[in-house]
Image (cartoon, helix red, strand yellow):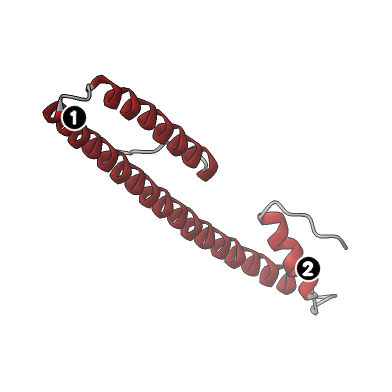
């Protein structure tokens, strides 16, 4: 089960975490106020419940952060593989153009990078 949404940015996730912490703080404050001064047993139960809620929230946030980091690393790896494949395709196109172009067998490296840039949807200034 995916804990975080795929389209959520790091800033959005951290803002959501801060909001959840703030909400939990408000909830724990309200819980503490329900126990009267003379009720030590109830106060201990509430403090134990608060500790469990805080631990659960902390564990949830750590898991979401780990999942986010894993997702970012996977995207970077996929991006590197994609760029490498585009590089290989550009190299093949470059070699085929050199073979077909008998008049100008010495195509410059600039042409290779132009082909690569086109494949990557970039524009190089000439």
Q: Could you give the CA–CA distance between mark 1 and mark 2, rounded to whole angstroms?
A: 75 Å
Residue at the location (66% across, 55% down)?
A: 120
Residue at the location (32% across, 47% down)?
A: 63
* Mark sitting on residue 111: 2
Q: Which residue is mark 1?
A: 43
Quarter of the image holding residue 40? top left
Q: Secondary structure at mark 1?
A: helix
Quarter of the image holding residue 100? bottom right
Could you tell me how many numbered marks the image carries?
2
Query: Closer to the camera, 6 or 19?
Result: 19
Left or right: 82, with 91 as reference point: left
Quarter of the image holding residue 123? bottom right
Q: Are marks 1 and 2 in contact (CB under 8 Å)?
A: no
Residue at the location (70% across, 69% down)?
A: 94
Work out which residue is located at the far front of the displayed protein and give it.
38
Q: Quadrant of the N terminus?
A: top left
Left or right: 40, with 60 as reference point: left
Percent x, y of residue 22:
43, 32
Packing grade of label 1 (10 A; few <14, some 14-19, many >=20) is: some
Left or right: 36, with 88 as reference point: left
Q: Secondary structure at mark 2?
A: helix
Percent x, y of residue 110:
79, 70
Work out which residue is located at the far left of the displayed protein and give it.
41
**In front: label 1 or label 2:** 1
Residue at the location (17% across, 24% down)?
A: 38
Query: Closer to the camera, 58 or 51?
Result: 51
Query: Which is more N-terminal, label 2 or label 1?
Result: 1
Q: Quadrant of the C terminus?
A: bottom right
Query: Closer to the camera, 66 or 70?
Result: 66
Query: Closer to the camera, 78 or 7?
Result: 7
Percent x, y of residue 81:
50, 62
């Amino acid at each position: 089960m995916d804990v975080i949404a795929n389209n959520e940015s790091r800033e959005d996730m951290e803002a959501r975490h801060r909001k959840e912490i703030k909400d939990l703080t408000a909830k724990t404050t309200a819980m503490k106020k329900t126990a009267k001064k003379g009720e030590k047993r109830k106060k201990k139960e509430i403090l134990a419940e608060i500790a469990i809620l805080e631990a659960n929230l902390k564990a949830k946030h750590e898991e979401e952060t780990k999942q986010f980091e894993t997702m970012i690393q996977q995207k970077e790896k996929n991006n590197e593989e994609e760029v490498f494949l585009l590089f290989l395709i550009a190299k093949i196109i470059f070699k085929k153009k050199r073979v077909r172009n008998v008049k100008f067998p010495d195509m410059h490296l600039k042409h290779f990078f132009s082909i690569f840039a086109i494949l990557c949807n970039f524009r190089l200034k000439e």
